[in-house]
Image (spheres, grey):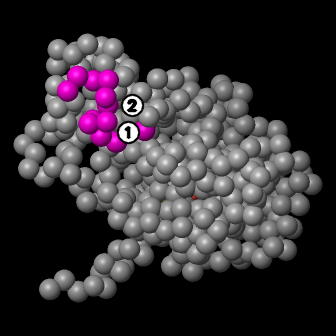
Amino acid sequence: MIPTPTTDMNTTQQTQPKTDLLTLTLPQLQEWLAARGEAAFRAKQIYSWIYQQLVDNFAAMSNLPLKLRQRLEEEACIGPLVVRSEMSSKDDRTRKILLELADGKLIESVLMLYPPLGESSARATVCVSSQAGCAFGCTFCATGQMGFDRHLQSGEIIAQVLHFARELRATPWSAAGLPGSTPIDHITNIVLMGMGEPLHNYDNVLQALRILNSAAGFNLGARHMTVSTVGLVPAIRKLSQEQLQVNLAISLHAPTNEARSQTMPVNRKYPLEELLAACQDYITATRRQVTFEYVLLAGVNDTPERAQQLAELLAPLKQFAHVNCIPVNATSAGYRPPGPDAIRAFRNILFERGISNSVRAERGDDIAAACGQLRTRFENRRKAIPVV
Ligand code: SAH
Ligand code: SF4
């Protein structure tokens, strides 16, 4: 089924809504062209222009007949997004943009650049939003505090990736202070860790991942994509049945129901027993490791007791569980990250009990990197400007 057309905000005089081609798989684009009497092979050409040449307009598609280009101009668009604000961290390893969608909703996307390290080559990871706002209200999350606006369409998810892909293609990045390293000119990873809950917007997210994964499309390996979820049990079970080898990350953040329900209201609907059972079944079905994200909140969930409980909770998953400790990015909610000693002590307890774990390097603090913070700042500033 071809998704419903969107309106192109660049052409406000529009009477017919335009189809955003970024919402279409290759067979859907072939169908769309066939319905207009165009040859199917044109779809591959258009796909190549969009996803390999990274063009953002039909005029550039020089191997298409002029008439077809004009028709596309009238009836289609390529993920129109307006960049409302752009920020780079001082070291230029984190770039954040605030995007305005066709209906005026605001979302954030982040590009994180990693220099080559030992054996591993440089990485360019896009952190993508899946919804405008979020319905799940986690107390430490700036997006959760703004409430839910709407799901993003698959094209709006893909457009975020293409924005940064074009930027890197035009100006490859090399880490300052690493003169010999090869500049990186393409996106290597995608994480659905921006605004919103990806599994709440299941169909559009899966459509976007399939298009980004397809050889004729963006051609990014599924193993380079990560879906992060607050823990929607039925959707995790559904995902385990898809033939798509994406990585799964579970936002755990507390090892007991009592503690988890205090910061994550979703726990009352899907408590830990059900969540862990779904993870176990996911592992059995996919034989893939699951990452458990654990936002460290000083004095709230970072005690040795919590570390022990966490190790016990995950012990049955054995080597298939990995914990990613994330010192919280301070938001208006007043949480603070623990100091290095507390983080080390927490991790050591996990190590001693055989739970593999890592800590996410803090980055981009100077540009409000935690999800939802840039939009919050932007909207507060907008409110502060009186409208006459
Ligand atoms: N809704 C999904 C994905 C988006 S949030 C989810 O919750 O998993 C991506 C990750 O950022 C989640 O693990 C989330 O808990 C974490 N996060 C939210 N607010 C944060 C903050 N203030 N500091 C650090 N991580 C945060
Ligand atoms: Fe939503 Fe994820 Fe933020 Fe929770 S952490 S409010 S699920 S975006």
Residue linked to disc 1 = 55
Secondary structure category for the residue under label 2: helix
Q: Residue at x 75, y 69 (%)?
A: 302
- Image coordinates of residue 243 in percent, x first then y, are 56, 22
- Residue 152 locus on image (x, y percent): 35, 47
Whether disc 1's CB lies below 8 Å from ligand 1 is answered: no
**Residue 66 falls left or right of residue 45:** left
Q: Are marks 1 and 2 in contact (CB under 8 Å)?
A: yes
Quick one: label 2, few (<14), some, or many (20+) residues within 10 Å? many
The 10 Å Cα crowd at callout 1, few under 14, some 14 to 19, many 20 or more, is some
User: Looking at the rendered structure, which numbered label has been put on residue 49?
Assistant: 2
- Residue numbers of the magenta segment: 54-66
Magenta stretch secondary structure, dominant: loop
Residue 297 in the image: state x and y as whole percent.
Answer: 67, 71
Judged left or right of residue 358, residue 127 is left
Q: Which is nearer the N-term, disc 1 or disc 2?
A: 2
